[in-house]
Image (cartoon, rainbow, N blue to C red):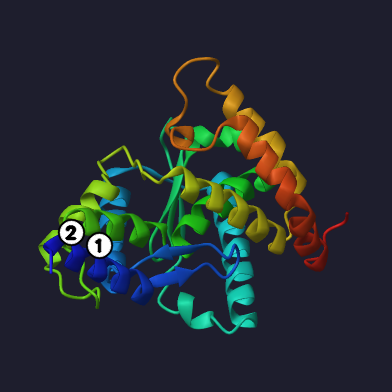
């Protein structure tokens, strides 16, 4: 039997064994990397980033924490309601505002969130923050880090049917390629499909948390306008085109408004 055929069989077995379905969007993806390892490395990177950055305190930082906790609580309530509360059992949520001119925000696997002060003039208020933080938290909840790492492992021939037989240093090297964190720069590289999913999931999460999802389009318009025809903020570099994003949000708004209404929002 040819080696390529054997590899094909192995990839098929791996795909079936490691297929994960997002409980909010219904999208399926291959995720077989060890979540415990990923979250441990994410925690280490987060601590390093906080050590090398200026953590902001005061009213703006409190707004970040307020929004983050509302989204966290909404996610936990939803996952518990569908019998998947254990998915979030190991999350150690933390929300920090960092003094940095970058127009960016991110959430590491395991719930470690950072918002850069450079994005605040664009968010304007807590609803705008909810668009950003809902989107970033969705990357973590959807396992996009695991998905990207799994993709890299497959490309390097490191995956196994169980998803466990991989040396820690190899995982760490791949993690660094997916999350290349420096002292002042955090660039989380996701694909367009993952970004679109985070848009949808984030829209639903902010709605579940009681934030008006209709404010998502004005926020993304402000974000796009912030580039002023120059290079886009890193936050937008791999995202769908503005037209595609708006079309996606408009498509998902009816369901988002149902979540918003259920959370006590006024339609």
Position of residue 130 relative to residue 77, above or below, is above
* Residue 240 percent coordinates (x, y): 53, 37
Position of residue 255 relative to residue 87, above or below, is above
Left or right position of 55 against 123: left
Q: Quadrant of the C terminus?
A: bottom right
Residue wearing tag 1: 41
Left or right position of 157 against 88: left
Q: Residue at x 60, y 23 (%)?
A: 225
Q: Earlier in the sequence, mark 1 or mark 2?
A: 1
- Name the foreground residue: 110 vs 81: 81
User: Residue 4, which numbered label?
Assistant: none
Q: Quadrant of the N terminus?
A: bottom left
Q: Quadrant of residue 17?
A: bottom left
Q: Residue at x 33, y 54 (%)?
A: 148
* Residue 180 percent coordinates (x, y): 26, 44
Q: Are marks 1 and 2 in contact (CB under 8 Å)?
A: yes
- Name the foreground residue: 77 vs 4: 4
* Residue 18 percent coordinates (x, y): 35, 72
* Residue 112 percent coordinates (x, y): 41, 59
Residue wearing tag 2: 172
């Amino acid at each position: 039997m040819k080696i390529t055929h054997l590899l094909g069989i192995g990839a098929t077995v791996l795909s079936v064994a490691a297929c994960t379905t997002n409980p909010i969007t219904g999208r399926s993806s291959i995720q077989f990397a060890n979540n415990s390892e990923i979250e441990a490395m994410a925690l280490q990177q987060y601590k390093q980033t906080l050590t090398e950055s200026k953590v902001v305190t005061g009213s703006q930082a409190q707004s970040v924490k307020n929004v983050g906790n509302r989204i966290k609580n909404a996610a936990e309530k939803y996952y518990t309601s569908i019998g998947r509360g254990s998915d979030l059992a190991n999350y150690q949520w933390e929300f920090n505002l960092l003094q940095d001119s970058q127009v960016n925000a991110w959430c590491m696997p395991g719930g470690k969130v950072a918002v850069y002060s450079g994005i605040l003039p664009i968010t304007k208020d807590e609803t705008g923050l909810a668009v950003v933080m809902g989107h970033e938290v969705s990357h973590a909840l959807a396992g996009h880090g695991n998905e990207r790492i799994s993709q890299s492992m497959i490309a390097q021939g490191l995956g196994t049917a169980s998803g466990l037989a991989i040396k820690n240093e190899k995982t760490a090297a791949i993690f660094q390629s997916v999350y290349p964190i420096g002292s002042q720069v955090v660039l989380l590289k996701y694909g367009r499909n993952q970004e679109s999913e985070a848009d949808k999931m984030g829209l639903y999460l902010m709605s579940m948390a009681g934030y008006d999802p209709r404010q998502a389009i004005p926020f993304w318009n402000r974000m796009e306008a912030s580039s002023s025809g120059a290079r886009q903020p890193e936050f937008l570099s791999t995202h769908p085109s503005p037209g595609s994003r708006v079309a996606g949000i408009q498509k998902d708004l009816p369901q988002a408004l149902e979540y918003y209404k259920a959370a006590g929002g006024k339609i």
